[in-house]
Amino acid sequence: MAAASTSMAATAVFASCFPLSSTTKAAPARCSALPYLPPRLSAIAFPSSLKFAEPKRSSLLQVKASSSEESGAVDTSELLTDLKEKWDALDNKSTVIVYGGGAIVAVWLSSIVVGAINSIPLLPKIMELVGLGYTGWFVYRYLLFKSSRKELAEDIEQLKKKIAGTE
């Protein structure tokens, strides 16, 4: 019974949308169950002297930017002379060129591999889950407790010494 009354109400609302005969030429009827709303007021309707005041915000921190010649300026000629001196001091220039080229190729290849992995469905989400899992393990293993933070700091110092060649 309720379904019948609902369909009858819908028929009554939309009945005026369709012309009863093809010979009747009437203005197109508005087909909507919503009531007619008046048009919005435009900005022209308000007088131009009416201004809305912005709320005043109290600022606890004020930052003032300034520039100084000593800290911000980088002398390019000095930078180039330093680089030239370091390049001239190198013994194996070909090794540096090979390592630099290898690094560029490695970045390019890794970009291609990441793009290929990203195009496989579901694999990027699985990789995100693996990354989140590893991050959680790392936090638990090295950052949660004071003794493990000391161990991490010692491992980093050993790695820095190994890279610098002082060990």
Image (tube, rainbow, N blue to C red):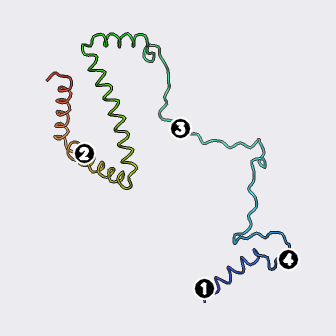
Q: In the image, which is nearer the foreground, mark 4 or mark 3?
A: 4
Residue under numbered circle 4? 23
- State whether residue 166 is above or below residue 150: above
Residue 128 sits above or below residue 86 on the image:
below
Q: Residue at x 31, y 52 (%)?
A: 129
**Where does the N terminus fall, quadrant-wise?**
bottom right
Residue at the location (73% across, 56% down)?
40
Residue 165 is drawn in which quadrant? Answer: top left
The kind of residue tagged 1 is Ala
Q: Nearer the viewer, mark 3 or mark 2?
A: 2
Q: Which mark is residue 58?
A: 3
Give the quarter of the figure containing the C terminus: top left
Marking on residue 3:
1
Taking the view exactly as shown, the residue that stands out farthest to the bottom is: 1
Q: Which residue is mark 2?
A: 139
Choose top left, top right, bottom left or bottom right for residue 20: bottom right
Q: CA distance from mark 4 to mark 3?
A: 70 Å
* Front residue of 110 and 148: 110
Q: First in sequence: mark 2 or mark 4?
A: 4
Name the element at disc 2: helix
Mark nearer the N terminus (3 vs 1): 1
Looking at numbered disc 4 in the image, what kind of residue is underneath it? Thr
3 or 1: mark nearer the eye: 1
Q: CA distance from mark 3 to mark 2?
A: 39 Å
